[in-house]
Amino acid sequence: MSVSLTIIFSLCVLVGAVGGAAVLTWFERRLLGIWQDRYGPNRLGPFGVLQVLADMLKLLTKHDWTPPFADRVVFVVAPTAIVVAMMMAFAVVPFSDSLYIIDLNIGLLFFLGMSSLAVYSVLLGGLASNNKYALLGGLRSAAQMVSYEVFMGLSLMGVVMLTGSFSLRDIVLAQEDGWYCFPQVLGLYVFLIAGIAESHRLPFDLPEAEHELTAGFHTEYSGMKFTMFMLGEYLGLILISAMITTLFFGGWLGPDWAPGVFWFGLKTFIFICFFILLRAAIPRPRYDQLMSLGWKYMLPLTLINLLLTGAIALSLQGGGNV
Amino acid sequence: MFDSLISQFRSLWSVLQHSFSAAETVQYPEQKPYLAPRYRGRIVLTNDPDGDERCVACNLCAVACPVDCIALQQGVREDGRWYPEFFRINFSRCILCGMCEEACPTNAIQLTPDFEMCEYDRQNMVYEKEHLQIEGTGKYHDYNFYRVCGLKITGKDKGDARNEAPPVDVKTLLP
């Protein structure tokens, strides 16, 4: 793609992702409503979809208050970090065979790096608020990210081993013979759980656990800055779903009668719904349970997966030189 | 560990099954819920089957009221019967507890299944007698206080007429 086309396309991705995240706030509430035998927001517009506009209007016109005791600069910078990091990660996602912003040969590492950068947002937000709840939320988030980051990266190494490349495009192309969700089922399982923890979605939203920490790291945030945090969270949800699709479910691959973007979008959508289902069904674990799950079960599981994948890949190659 | 994993999948599955069950929600302003006749809502004053007002201004409702939202002034008609000269309920205080209804010996004051009484001006929450009084008998169609308790007139005490039972001694009804 030429430079100007790439710029236009990245703008499209930017707008699409932010718009998708906005619509997702409504969609999530409707879906939760369906699963909890109620309606959710259904008043404004067809199926209540204009609720998004109303919420946006409300958030934009709210008093954007910075507490006098907060660290001003960090307090303002923190919410932007999560959105920037998440948006950057979208750059390496291949939407279809020809539709991607950039095909980095270290695309997977770039994604992991960017999703780790998002932790700073939560951490700094909690720290700069100068509030005990926010600090506890930031603290939890730091510990959670450090633990889950470890095997989030490791769980993907099986995929990298099978493909022999860190480029997301190569990974998708390597799945033409069969999606990685079967040979890498352990990796998929671990990545799914780590992904929820990484985007702190509901079963693992301990940094903001509202019944213990009021709102955790964003207790002091309001108006536009709060919106940024929410936007970051929903962008993270879309990103993780897109990554699961890309890494384990063949990305844009699908029957020929529809374009690749359609299959990519459909698979991503299904995973977004699955994440919302997790939110509707699974209660939040205790903090120590979260930690012990991570270190005692998930990490060994990842290492076993890594060993098995390596051994099988090696034996199939006939014991080549690695 | 394995058991808890199974239980997580089971709860996921049972929540997913709710995709096909109808919502419990009653879409209130368009869809009114059924309220039983004895629902405790807006208070009314009723008439007896003959069309005369039931309230005898005995003040028992005002005494029973835990929030003191009822105010009334007793007046006397030419035949000696009492009636309320004014009857005022401050609905911004009323907690719709129904104590007044229970205290009322003539079933005059009754609570109805209407609760939509919002006002922008708090003064409009104060209902006067003309707002409270209704034409009908409310929940008790056949009840007429004086038919039950008897009526004392000149030359005849309660229970003295030919087909009239003597009045019940209320002291014997105590528990």
Image: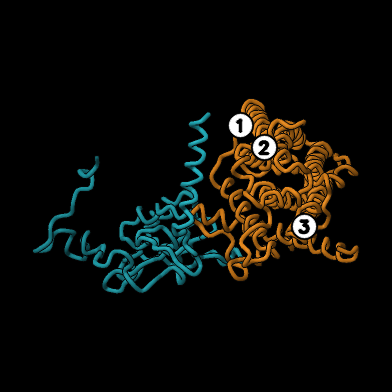
Residue A316 appears at what percent x and percent y? Answer: 66, 36
Decide: is B167 above or below A153.
below
Question: Upstream in the sequence, badge 1 or badge 3?
Answer: 3
- Of circles 3 and 2, the one toward us is 2
Chain letter corresponding to the colour cyan: B
For residue A206, the mark is 2
| Identity of the residue drawn at 63% across and 59% down | A254
Q: Is residue A125 visible?
A: no
Q: Which residue bears the numbered disc 3?
A: A62
Cα separation, mark 2 vs mark 1, equals 8 Å
Q: Chain of mark 1?
A: A
- The front one of B88 and A214 is A214
Residue A167 screen position, x and y as percent = 79, 47
Label the orange chain with its letter.
A
> Secondary structure beneath disc 1?
loop
Q: Earlier in the sequence, mark 3 or mark 2?
A: 3
Quarter of the image for the C terminus of chain A: give it: top right
For residue A106, side relative to residue A160 (left or right)? right
Whole-Å distance between the Cαs marked 3 and 2?
Answer: 26 Å
Q: Residues within 10 Å of mark 2 (few under 14, many from 20)?
A: many
